[in-house]
């Protein structure tokens, strides 16, 4: 089997891909995301995942590259990682008591053949109404600063979520079931 490369240093994506029990290596993609591109959200998340995957192709001949990108969409707002407490507060106030969409784009590239497949999956997330005190307490944990939409639904952020409609792993950043299906076309079988 060809070497599999996860073009992401996200611990969540690594944890999800480990569930397949496939051997893989992690490579950082130095691709610079541009969330301001004027594309529909589904196209943008795919475009960003392609950029991440293509950034590691040259250094990894004869490999299967997997890259992903995730962000939140709420009423025309695209929410990536807030990076600051102030931006996290703005995002959580915007999402409080609403339903929004979480979209993950994935690109798979066979570097030997040049074959490439890009797709996206989405889930709907229903967030509870959050008090200012709850928002401040959550931000104080540091958890929201490097998470799309300023929350991690698989960690302490789960306390902010009423329910999700869709695949949990898509919401975490890597749609595992769909990825396994798509990998079969590249000669990689999980089960």
Image: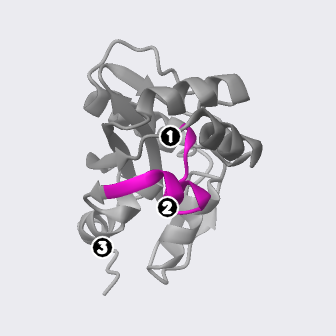
18 or 66: nearer the viewer = 18
In this rendering, the label closer to the viewer, 3 or 1: 1
The quadrant where residue 146 appears: top right
Q: Nearer the viewer, mark 2 or mark 1?
A: 1
* Mark 3 → mark 2, Cα distance in angstroms: 13 Å
Q: Is residue 47 left or right of residue 146?
A: left
Q: Position of residue 29 (x, y in %)?
A: 62, 42
In this image, 30 relative to 22: left or right? right
Q: Nearer the viewer, mark 3 or mark 2?
A: 3
Residue 68: in magenta span: no
Confirm whether residue 111 shows in the render.
no
**Marks 2 and 1 in Cβ contact (< 8 Å):** no
Residue receiving disc 3: 187
* Position of residue 38 measured from the top left corner of the image (x, y, whole percent): 34, 12
Quickly name the residue at label 1. Answer: 130
Circle 1: is it few (<14), some (14-19), or many (20+) Cα within 10 Å?
A: some
Query: In the rendering, at what x and y percent does residue 188 appear?
Result: 34, 75
Q: Which residue is mark 2?
A: 62
Picture layout, residue 168 above or below residue 131: below
């Amino acid at each position: 089997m060809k070497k599999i490369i996860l073009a992401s240093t996200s611990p969540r994506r690594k944890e999800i891909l480990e569930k397949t029990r496939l051997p893989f290596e992690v490579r950082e993609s130095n691709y610079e995301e541009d969330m301001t591109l004027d594309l529909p959200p589904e196209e943008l998340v795919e475009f960003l995942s392609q950029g991440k995957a293509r950034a590691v192709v040259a250094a990894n001949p004869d490999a299967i590259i997997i890259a992903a990108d995730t962000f939140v969409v709420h009423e025309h707002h695209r929410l990536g990682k807030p990076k600051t407490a102030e931006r996290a507060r703005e995002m959580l106030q915007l999402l409080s008591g609403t339903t929004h969409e979480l979209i993950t784009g994935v690109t798979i590239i066979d570097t030997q053949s040049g074959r490439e497949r890009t797709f996206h999956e989405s889930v709907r997330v229903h967030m509870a109404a959050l008090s200012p005190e709850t928002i401040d307490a959550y931000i104080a944990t540091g958890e929201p600063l490097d998470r799309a939409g300023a929350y991690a639904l698989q960690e302490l952020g789960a306390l902010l979520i009423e329910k999700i409609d869709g695949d949990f792993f898509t919401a975490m950043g890597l749609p595992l079931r769909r990825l396994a299906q798509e990998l079969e076309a590249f000669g990689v079988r999980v089960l």
